[in-house]
Amino acid sequence: MNPLPAEQLHKTLDNPKLQVAIYDATGRLMDKRKTSIQPSAIEDFQSYRDQANLIKRHAIENLDFYLEQIEENVTRRGGKVLWARDAADATRIVLELAREKNIRSIVKSKSMTTEEIELNEHLEHDKIEVVETDLGEYIIQLAHEKPYHIVAPALHKTRYEVADLFTEKLGVEREEVIEKQTMIARRVLREKFLAAELGITGANFLIADSGAIVLIENEGNARLTSSAPRIQIAVAGIEKVIPRAQDLATFLKVLGRSATGQPLTVYTSFLSGPRRPGEIDGPEEFYLLLIDNGRTRVLADKDKRQSLYCIRCGACLNHCPVYRKIGGHNYPWVYSGPIGAILSPQFHGVTQDPWLPFASSLCGACGEVCPVKIEIPKILLQLRTEVTRAKQREGKDVWERRAFRAWSWLMCRPKLYAFAGAAGGMIFGGSDSKAWWKKAPLPFRIGPLQKWLSQRDLPPPAARTFRQLWRERKALRDRTP
């Protein structure tokens, strides 16, 4: 997780096709969400957001109890619960299980948690074939890329790029019609489903009082992944647990609407352990892998633990002006957009990618649309404070602190401030150059300030200050009969 290269950022900003793809896709999702939450579509959508927030708050604050409960109920139904402290622990557990069962082919449904722990890379390193079965995930797997969006991982790909990719990787005739591209992927993936020995899924929710794992999707691939292979592993973060089955109704009303603008997703599956006698499908063995990977560290912070309420709908990304400009691959981890800006620093520490909490306009759109009412702008401000304090401890912000002290000193002296403004207007006022500051005295051209201004426009001072304009206006008004 290195600092964001300016070249990579500018490459995204200077790519008109990519900019259009991001804006069109997120714009459609925004419009669909807006339509789906109208009073004519659902009565009092905001009350469901309130309920979802209260349920998640209760679950997170009593997480130890509900995790023990779900372990008990999954075990009672014939499944096995495995616990992983971190990503290395989780990948080791899956690898050991695959080796023990002599598994060489795996199908996977969409899962941000498995992306988080880089499970595919570890399995492929062990010469195990892993195939993503969600269409978007399958496309980016073929392209050897990371998800661009939490819900729509291939959002940045045009159908023409997908056509080229399928021709190159699958050896098929080039096809630009989206429906026919889908059929090509379906033919390939059906063979993978039939041959797979292990299916790996994520989990949208874990229901503590029944031990059920809930999968929510639109394509049916997760249902096939969980039912066709003889062994299934559901991989989930420990924060996915909710107390009761009846609580799920609240989340189903807000998740689909927030993610894709649907009143309800096409497939909602409840998985409760391995196949029972008399059942015609389902796995012979079922495992639930529960992952911490930094979540208990977030849980310990009372002010920011609400970050764990996230249900991965992607609404904050769609409404974020920063995400809509820089896209998903300019974020350092698999979680992009506003939710990534608050999760990544908490999982990895604020000294890793300290720029991330500042990659926000603080417009508040993310908090307004979050279906579980996470106060994302508030958490961003708290993380900015932590970043600043960390820099102070390490002595990395000496020039920035000096600049703000100088500014504070000047602002506390109104007459001197007025004189400085008038002088700046006389010297630089009316300049058309965006880089007027390069002609300024040396203190304005030191390295740190120049680096800061490389990513920002600093307009030249006005030829006349506000005070001068106000005096002129007042004089004119006094002369008017």
Image (cartoon, helix red, strand yellow):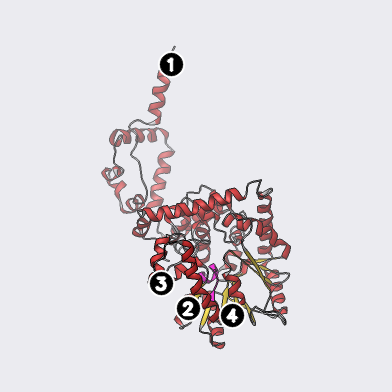
* Residue, disc 3: 172
Q: Quadrant of residue 465?
A: top left
* Residue, disc 1: 478
Q: Report the amino acid beneath label 3.
A: Val
Residue 283 versus residue 420: which sits nearer the camera? 283
Please state if 34 lies on the left or on the right of 44 as rendered. left
Instruction: Name which residue lies at 43% across and 18% down.
Output: 477
Please state if 342 lies on the left or on the right of 226 as rendered. left
Label located before the other in sequence (3 or 1): 3
Instruction: Name which residue lies at 70% across and 79% down.
Output: 279
* Residue, disc 4: 229
Q: State the extent of the magenta-drawn residues as a range.
A: 107-116
Query: Can residue 234 be seen at all in this image of the molecule?
Result: no
Q: Which mark is residue 122?
A: 2
Q: Report the amino acid beneath label 4.
A: Pro
Locate the N terminus by quadrant. Answer: bottom left
Label located before the other in sequence (2 or 1): 2
